[in-house]
Image: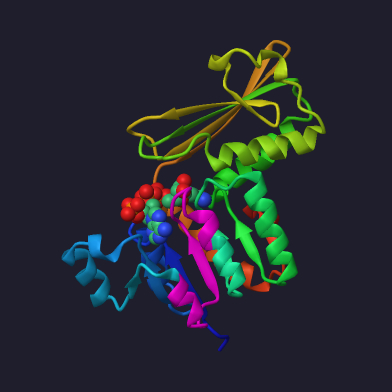
Amino acid sequence: MSKKIKVIVAGALGKMGAMAIETFLNNKDKFELKAGVVRNLKEIDNKSLKYYEDRGVTLTDNIETEFHKGDIDVLVELTTPDSVFKNSKLALDNGIRPVIGATGLSDEDILELSKKSLKANTGAIIAPNFAIGAILMMKFAAEAVKYMDRYEIIERHHEAKLDSPSGTAIKTAKLMSDAKVKANQSTFKDQKARGELYYDIPIHSLRLQGYVASQEVVFGGLGQTLTLKHDTIDRSSFMPGILLASEKVMNLDRLIYGLENII
Ligand SMILES: NC(=O)c1ccc[n+]([C@@H]2O[C@H](COP(=O)([O-])OP(=O)(O)OC[C@H]3O[C@@H](n4cnc5c(N)ncnc54)[C@H](OP(=O)(O)O)[C@@H]3O)[C@@H](O)[C@H]2O)c1
């Protein structure tokens, strides 16, 4: 029997983190959940503490101490933009492979993590979207962009989402821009209502009740439009991707940005 992958989940009581913890507990044949990291243990109510205690899950607010125990393979990072970089860097410094789902990393952050991962020969994965359908949407958008002249991205998320645009929208823009060699949308730079340009592609962000995560990439051509659309209706859509990334990262010796590179 191959060794179990020892994981720690940061952001353990968030919407994604709590579901990831249940997912790892349901996949004990491959994974051992070592701990869940919360921001402040003192703020956690007794009911939640008991719930996790009964399931044998250790909750901690000191990720560094957990890392120093030297018994963790993978950090699953599902916190917030203000913590994701620090936690991921700390993981790499301790020889732990980060699987990063939280958004908020800048291009500079990604470059620094990438260099660190390469230098330490330690795998890392940044997954702006863990849902297979969203990854397919990005791939198709990178194909369609070669044939269409105009294109814009509209993303819709629940109103509690802290950042905009979404990591998925930024990654989609990057893939489209890379595929086209040069995007050509910058003519509307001064009109804020036309969206914010990323890699020269306008992104429009909506934050409303009723959405989990949705994105459209709309292409315009002579006398026609093409729309690629993906809807996440439930966060369970992200869980197979989290398991896959946590497994694949064990065999990497550098950072991968986007699950499309490993499926
Ligand atoms: N890659 C993907 O497919 C995907 C899909 C959905 C969401 N996301 C991203 O994943 C992240 C989490 O999403 P969510 O919907 O679960 O958000 P959420 O419900 O707000 O959860 C975030 C959790 O992280 C905790 N946290 C913040 N800083 C922390 C720290 N330093 N240590 C430990 N815990 C910390 C928060 O605690 P407090 O409440 O105490 O601050 C909160 O419980 C977001 O960045 C979101 O954009 C990614």
Q: Which residue is drawn at 75% across and 23% down?
A: 148
Residue 161's x, y, as percent? Answer: 41, 40
Q: Is residue 157 above or below residue 17?
A: above
**Location of the C terminus (image quadrant):** bottom right
Q: Residue at x 51, y 62 (%)?
A: 87
- Front residue of 199 and 130: 199
**Location of the N terminus (image quadrant):** bottom right
Horizontal side, residue 154 vs residue 211: left or right = right
Horizontal side, residue 21 vs residue 258: left or right = left
- Region in magenta: 64-87
Residue 16 in view in this figure: no
Residue 10's x, y, as percent? Answer: 43, 63
Quarter of the figure with residue 211: top left
Q: What number of labels is visible?
A: 0
Residue 96's x, y, as percent? Answer: 58, 73
Residue 20's x, y, as percent? Answer: 41, 62
Q: In this view, does 199 lie above or below 194?
A: below
